[in-house]
Amino acid sequence: MSEDTGRAGQAARFLDWLASAAAEEQASDNGDDDLPLIELAELACAYAEQAFERAGGPQRALSLDCQRGCDYCCHLPVETSRAEASRALEFARENLSAEAFRELKRRIREAATAYPLSPQRPPAKNPSCPLLEDATCLVYPVRPLACRGWNSRDAAACRAAFERGVTEVTVPVDTRIRGVFANASEALLRGLTRTRRDGPTHLVPALAALIVLDRG
Ligand code: SF4
């Protein structure tokens, strides 16, 4: 099975799940479906990636100023779900050494003490995302949809917003790319809320809640 076929199948399963979530809500049925949260996050991601390709995303991305090592946006709160946070945490657990994973948990606990973050505060004063190490995302292949959609046509504007505050500086973005991932994120959250399994949260507090019972 090719990567495209696999992704198309996952995207279709995501749409099926959304339809069944809407039906459950109409029936006031709190029936739990079988799909684990992490798998739902994976299906939503496949759905978004497929939409990204169909919207000409890879071509559009060529005009962006985003590049590896640029991490201004990784100091902003990331709106997500527990499903996506779980997926990121499991990826980190599987790919980091035991010592590095313990250190990651320490950083998560520390970063969580700063929440909730004020939108007025310049991101430079926020703790960086604990999943960021040496200006690189530790969970890049499974990063949340909000992170995937975040983009910029001007890294200098990102830097100004980082230093002076996002309410002070407008960063020019590709709204089509942003929209594709925002729609998928919203759809995932809507389905999770309808099935009463999850709700909107921020990445750092969600990670902090997940590691509370984690003794690894
Ligand atoms: S998950 Fe990765 S891309 Fe998203 S804010 Fe954290 S370090 Fe940055």
Image (cartoon, rainbow, N blue to C red):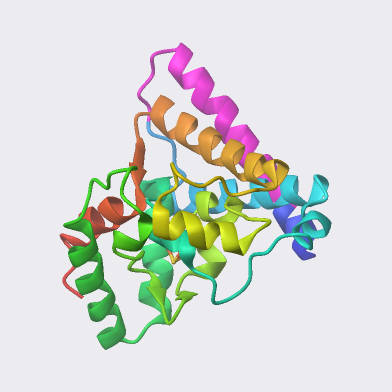
Q: Position of residue 158 (x, y in %)?
A: 54, 58
Name the residue nearer the viewer: 7 or 177: 177
Residue 200 in the image: above or below residue 163: above
Q: Quadrant of residue 110?
A: bottom left
Q: Tell me how many marks there are.
A: 0
Decide if residue 58 is on the left or right side of residue 25: right
Q: Which residues are magenta?
A: 8-31
Residue at the image position 25 percent from the left and 57 percent from the top: 210
Q: From the image, give the main secondary structure of the stretch colored magenta.
A: helix
Q: Position of residue 46 (x, y in %)?
A: 64, 52
Residue at the image position 51 percent from the left and 47 percent from the top: 169
Name the residue nearer the viewer: 163 or 58: 163
Q: Is residue 4 at all visible to an observer of this figure? A: yes
Decide if residue 40 is on the left or right side of residue 207: right
Q: Position of residue 194 (x, y in %)?
A: 42, 25
Name the residue nearer the viewer: 203 or 175: 175
Residue at the image position 80 percent from the left and 45 percent from the top: 55
Name the residue nearer the viewer: 47 or 122: 122
| Quadrant in which the C terminus appears | bottom left
User: Is residue 182 shown in magenta?
Assistant: no
Q: Is residue 143 at all visible to an observer of this figure? A: no
Residue 85 in the image: above or below residue 168: below
Residue at the image position 48 percent from the left and 31 percent from the top: 191
